[in-house]
Image: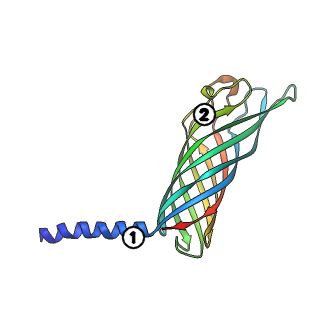
Amino acid sequence: MKISLLLLLPITLMIFVNQSYSQMEIKPAIGINFTGFSQNPENLTTSAQLGWQLGGTVSFGDKLYGEGGLFWTYKANDISETDTNITFSTSLSGVRIPVMVGYHFLGSESSLIGLRVFGGASMTIISNVDAEDLSKDDFTSPNYGVFLGAGVDFSLFFLDLKYEWSLSDVSSISSFDVGQARTLFINAGVRLSL
């Protein structure tokens, strides 16, 4: 009996690993983003500008799936002084690492057409900042966030829409106290099954 159970465990593990690998997708993607803040600094008004990201994810599973990835991300904002109406632009770029769990509520990974919902967490490591009188050291890095989203699959292509809330303040200095970031991400790419 013990020998049967000991043999059953590795066989079950091999079947699970085989099934997981047969349901793996590599998903290179490109997208745009818009980042706003939870509050405006004193005497300043911020407005989201077009940003972008480039990277990809790897997905494991079928109806219920896990996904993780790596993106080079660029975010931009315009900041206006309310007294003088002078506007200057700020931008930051870095590596964003999202991990998520999702569910295909219509179709599955292998379906021609599918609809998905997902949620997860991310970490962004800032590598470059272009802002008047601010440096990279004035921004919180890494910055952690949580997100929810939905996606559409059509044949080899996909389109994802997600909204992310940062868990930490964007900056630690009082002159640029904007609170947490709120980012809308739109990604499009291809699904490459392995």
Q: Residue at x 60, y 35 (%)?
A: 127
Q: Quadrant of residue 132?
A: top right
Q: Residue at x 85, y 29 (%)?
A: 86
Q: What amino acid type should be assigned to the residue bearing mark 1?
A: Gln
Which residue is situated farthest in the bottom direction here? 112
Q: What amino acid type should be assigned to the residue bearing mark 2?
A: Asp
x and y percent of residue 181 in the render?
65, 40
The quarter of the image holding the N terminus is bottom left
Q: Residue at x 66, y 23 (%)?
A: 174
Q: Secondary structure at mark 2?
A: loop
The front one of 45 and 61 is: 61
* Side of 64 relative to 140 (left or right): left
Q: State the CA–CA distance, disc 1 to disc 2.
A: 41 Å
- Pointer 1 local density, CA inside 10 Å: few below 14, some 14–19, many at least 20: some
Examine the rendered structure and indicate whether residue 123 appears above or below residue 68.
above
x and y percent of residue 33 in the render?
69, 49
Q: Quadrant of residue 16?
A: bottom left
Say whether disc 1 or disc 2 marks the residue closer to the N-terminus: 1
x and y percent of residue 59 in the render?
50, 61
Which label sits on residue 19? Answer: 1
Q: Nearer the viewer, mark 1 or mark 2?
A: 1
Which label sits on residue 98? Answer: none
* Side of 145 relative to 33 (left or right): left
Examine the rendered structure and indicate whether residue 185 appears above or below residue 85.
below
Say which residue label 2 marks: 169
x and y percent of residue 168 in the render?
57, 36
Q: Secondary structure at mark 1?
A: helix
The front one of 58 and 49 is: 58
Q: Quadrant of residue 41?
A: top right
* Side of 113 relative to 42 (left or right): left
Residues at marks 1 and 2 touching, judged by CB atoms closer than 8 Å: no
- Pointer 2 local density, CA inside 10 Å: few below 14, some 14–19, many at least 20: some
